[in-house]
């Protein structure tokens, strides 16, 4: 199995071979299988495009380690079903094969929204076959009933094979294989229990790669070896090649932010047929105005690992010079910083180190007080507070943060309450909350968002140029967010 850089995978994005790794439920082993499959295929010389269904930030870090490419999310709730295909093709440019890891159980999606944001919906949107990872522990023939149910539930979802995980013995394997064969679904792999592939977890899931790089490398190598030894890679690649062609075009950050307005339609002469309002004349790829680069500092490092790759791509396309800094190590913001983006992560784990970096805390506070645009999501919100678990933070917001016993998790339908550097009041975005902390008060005098669903409330802070909130959003759904932010960086 070698790279096919001259074949369909390298240029014709719609023809990139692809498959979706799904499971009946969380905990079945799909992250191990998906990551191991990515690494095993990459180890055979293939350019592998890694993807994750849903808003998860942590798994894509392991995918990136396995493939050497940026892990990307495909979320039909945050971005809308219409962007799933284009964002996939954007990430899969130049690749020989793509592996998409599902979320939760195959048919589980946004609560109360039917199939929306489920792995099944994404598989259908991508016209991709599904490999079902089944935890076979403590059962034998019952596995066949489970597989039969998943195969027959939605005829539009094509389950092309099964990988049996946590098989106890040779005898157990024979029994389960025979049972699944009776359903008519091929068994493409059998994996035994392997503690060396386990990844440690804590209050918000797996520990990110950035916090355990050397151990993560070893774990991914173990996953690759397990999948290579226990699965039929040729059969899996053949299944991926059976994916249907996509008719959409790849997403492009430059086209998304689109600096230049579309040229006006020609004025029709009397009696002429009016032009089709859907017609959009071709025009050059939009470019940022010359000489208007704005330096935007983006927080990174072990404490701030949650971000979507498309955010920095949109900022750059909007005319920003994106510079990454590490709040755990850098004692001041990059020189010439005109705007600041602080995404999600685990500041609660590194609260002492963040607090000890007084120079950077002062630098952040000075920038915010100057009125420069600052966009902070979740972990960024905590960092801007007066304190976190009693330790001094940046003090930009008159609020305190602390760890909580309660996990806040779920999709949100939100509308901007206040004009900010990110959005005008009334802008509607869908987002996701994922934290085990509490900020008091939960909203400022000018809140950031009004939550429309699942419950009505206001949340977050808009002060001077600061927009701080628990809500994670995906800017590809509303590229004007990046354009507005960069324009504010130029003028503030």
Image: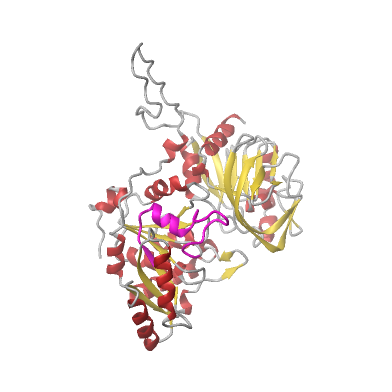
- Find the magenta span and give its range: 105-131
* Magenta stretch: includes residue 129: yes
Left or right: 276, with 463 as reference point: left
The percent coordinates of residue 25 (x first, y second) are 50, 69
- Taking the spot 70% from the left edge, 43% from the top edge, the residue there is 461
Q: Is residue 373 visible?
A: yes
- Residue 411 screen position, x and y as percent: 59, 53
Where is 123 relative to 35, above or below?
Answer: above
Q: Is residue 228 above or below residue 290?
A: below
Horizontal relation, residue 119 to residue 472: left or right: left
In the rendered image, residue 461 lying in the magenta stretch gets the answer: no
263 to 420, vertically: above or below: above
Q: Position of residue 115 (x, y in %)?
A: 49, 56
Which of 222/472 is in front?
Answer: 472
Q: Is residue 333 left or right of residue 195?
A: right
Give the image location of residue 159, x and y in percent. Answer: 37, 65
Quarter of the figure with the C terminus: top right
Q: What residue appears at the point 32 percent right and 73 percent down from the top-left corner? A: 184
Residue 303, quarter of the rendered image? bottom right
Q: Quadrant of residue 328?
A: bottom right
| Front-lying residue, 280 or 214 | 280
Locate the N terminus by quadrant. bottom left
Compare residues 117 and 352 and report the one nearer the observer.
117
Residue lying at the far left of the rendered structure: 6
Magenta part, dominant SS = loop
Q: Residue at x 63, y 46 (%)?
A: 376
How is the model colour-coded? Answer: secondary structure
């Amino acid at each position: 199995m070698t790279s096919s850089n001259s074949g369909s995978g390298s240029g014709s994005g719609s023809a990139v071979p692809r498959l979706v790794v799904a499971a009946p439920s969380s905990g079945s082993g799909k992250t191990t299988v998906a990551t191991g499959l990515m690494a095993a295929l990459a180890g055979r010389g293939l350019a592998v495009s890694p993807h994750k269904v849903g808003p998860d930030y942590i798994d894509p870090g392991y995918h990136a380690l396995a493939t050497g490419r940026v892990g990307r999310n495909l979320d039909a709730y945050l971005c809308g079903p219409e962007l799933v295909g284009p964002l996939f093709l954007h990430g899969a440019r130049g690749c020989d094969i793509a592996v998409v890891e599902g979320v939760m159980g195959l048919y589980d999606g946004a609560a109360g929204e039917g199939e929306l944001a489920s792995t099944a919906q994404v598989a259908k949107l991508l016209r991709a076959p599904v490999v079902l990872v089944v935890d076979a522990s403590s059962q034998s023939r019952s596995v066949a009933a489970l597989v039969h149910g998943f195969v027959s539930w939605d005829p539009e979802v094509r389950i092309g094979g099964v990988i049996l995980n946590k098989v106890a013995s040779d005898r157990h394997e024979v029994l389960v294989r025979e049972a699944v064969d009776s359903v008519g679904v091929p068994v493409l792999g059998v994996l035994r229990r392997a503690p060396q592939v386990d990844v440690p977890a804590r209050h918000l899931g797996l520990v990110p790669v950035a916090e355990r790089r050397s151990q993560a490398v070893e774990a991914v190598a173990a996953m690759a070896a397990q999948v290579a030894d226990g699965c039929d890679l040729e059969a899996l690649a053949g299944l991926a090649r059976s994916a249907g062609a996509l008719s959409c075009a790849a997403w492009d950050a430059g086209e998304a932010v689109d600096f230049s307005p579309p040229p006006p339609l020609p004025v029709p002469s009397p009696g002429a047929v009016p032009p089709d309002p859907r017609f959009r004349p071709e025009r050059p790829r939009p470019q940022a105005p010359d000489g208007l680069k704005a330096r935007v500092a983006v927080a990174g490092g072990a404490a701030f690992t949650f971000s979507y790759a498309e955010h920095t791509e949109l900022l750059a396309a909007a005319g920003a010079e994106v510079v990454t800094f590490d709040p755990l190590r850098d004692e001041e913001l990059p020189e010439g910083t005109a705007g600041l983006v602080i995404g999600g992560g685990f500041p609660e784990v590194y609260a002492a180190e963040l607090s000890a970096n007084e120079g950077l805390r002062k630098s952040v506070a000075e920038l915010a007080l100057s009125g420069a645009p600052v966009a902070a999501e979740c972990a960024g919100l905590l960092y801007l507070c007066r304190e976190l678990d009693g330790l001094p933070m940046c003090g930009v917001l008159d609020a305190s943060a602390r760890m909580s016993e309660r996990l806040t998790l779920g999709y949100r339908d939100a509308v901007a309450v206040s004009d900010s550097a990110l959005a005008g009041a009334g802008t509607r975005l869908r987002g996701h909350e994922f934290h085990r902390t509490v900020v008091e008060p939960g909203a400022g005098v000018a809140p950031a968002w009004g939550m429309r669903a699942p419950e009505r409330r206001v949340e977050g802070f808009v002060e001077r140029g600061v927009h701080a909130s628990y809500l994670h959003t995906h800017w590809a759904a509303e590229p004007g967010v990046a354009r507005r932010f960069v324009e504010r960086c130029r003028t503030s």
